Image (cartoon, rainbow, N blue to C red):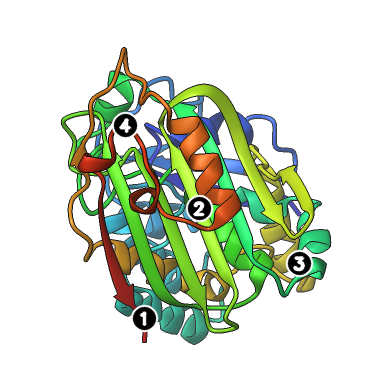
Amino acid sequence: MTARIALVGANGHGLHHREQLAEFEAGELVALCDRAEVEEAPEGVPVFTDHTEMLASVKPDVVIVSTPPATHLSIAADALRAGADVLLEKPPVLNLAEHEALSQVEKATGRAVQIGFQALASPDLPRLKALAPCDVSVFASWQRDDDYWVRSPWAGRLPLDGALRNPFAHAVMQALAVSGSEPVKVEVAWCRIRDIEVEDTATLRLTLASEQRVLIAVTLAGEDFIDSRMIVGEVELDYRVDSGLPLLENLLAHRRSGEPLVAPLELTRGFTAVVEALGTMPRPGLARSEEGVLVGVNAALEQCARNFTLLNEIDTPWAATVTGGTATIG
């Protein structure tokens, strides 16, 4: 039976979901919802401005939630109570209290929440997990221009955006999944090259309950492009999976036959703990750039990833602008 799928947050990243759903044979898009005007809605698909009205009118089997993170708890909980399973974009929520609240609704309703961490569908994940216990690190160098930081009202602003909480959230979650342990200590050193509130360049070091370490070294102001490169013991590979369809297909299989979820809400608790801890850290300092590039950042990040050091523990031309902090979880 074809699943009836609704999308809340039809604009912005929701456009990506709409493109994928147009080619998705196992499900039918039956409703769109967004507070803003939805352009080029598919013919015959109703458009709503209120998700509760949509849920009552359409009664979808699955709801994809692609809205700002601060809205995730209320929308996802309403969808679960309406009898739908949920594919929820990352970050799932912004703190552990919200995470627990959503978990309670999931259990009470008997429905399922899959989180949009596409990399957890990577075919390499089982092989990497088999290498644990060992330290895990990731380094990546991307570039995002000025338009990226004004793409939405919350872009570049706390507590919703930032390199670690948004584009490189996959790196953090993937490293935690490989390690199979929860974080107990969070250390960060970061900076920015634009007039934004959040970091575009960061190193994050996690100490886990298993005493393993995770080191994430990433930038959105990079030199030569380096995709998300993960190091687990002696193994190095790029781990990203760009399409969200494997997660949706897995969620539908879970509905049909109970197949285990690839990215269940419970698996992301450690990630949520990190997001909450990052909200307590000092603001990133402002570094000088050249034509939107932080000169020397690629070599610095690779050094940090390979040696499990933070940016404020090595010499760089912009070291004076790097701020840092530490938080304990639990």
Query: Does dot 3 land on a helix, a strand or a loop?
Result: helix
Q: Which comes before the other along the chain, label 2 or label 4?
A: 2
The numbered mark at residue 216 is 2
Residue drawn at 50 percent across, 53 percent down: 216
**Helix, strand or loop for disc 4:** loop
Q: Secondary structure at mark 1?
A: loop
- The type of residue carrying mark 4 is Pro
Instruction: Read off the residue under disc 4.
Output: 317
Q: Looking at the picture, how far across and down is residue 181, in whole percent?
A: 59, 78
Residue 48 appears in the picture as rendered = yes
Q: Position of residue 288 (x, y in %)?
A: 23, 25
The residues bearing labels 3 and 2 have C-alpha atoms spaced at a distance of 17 Å
Q: CA distance from mark 1 to mark 2?
A: 18 Å
Q: Toward which corner of the image does residue 93 lie, by quadrant?
A: bottom left
User: Quarter of the image holding residue 57?
Assistant: bottom left
Please tell me how crowded label 3 is: few (under 14), some (14-19), or many (20+) other residues with Cα within 10 Å. some
Lower position in the chain sequence, tag 3 or tag 4: 3
First reached walking from the N terminus: tag 1 or tag 3: 3
State yes or no: discs 3 and 2 in contact (Cβ < 8 Å).
no
Quarter of the picture holding the N terminus: bottom right
Number of the front mark, 2 or 4: 4
What residue is disc 1 on? 329
Q: Nearer the viewer, mark 4 or mark 1?
A: 4
Question: For mark 4, does the 10 Å Cα neighbourhood hold few (<14), some (14 to 19), or many (20 or more) residues?
Answer: few
Disc on the earlier residue, 3 or 2: 3
- Between label 1 and label 2, give the one nearer the viewer: 2
Residue placed at 39% from the left, 81% from the top? 100
Q: Which mark is residue 129?
A: 3
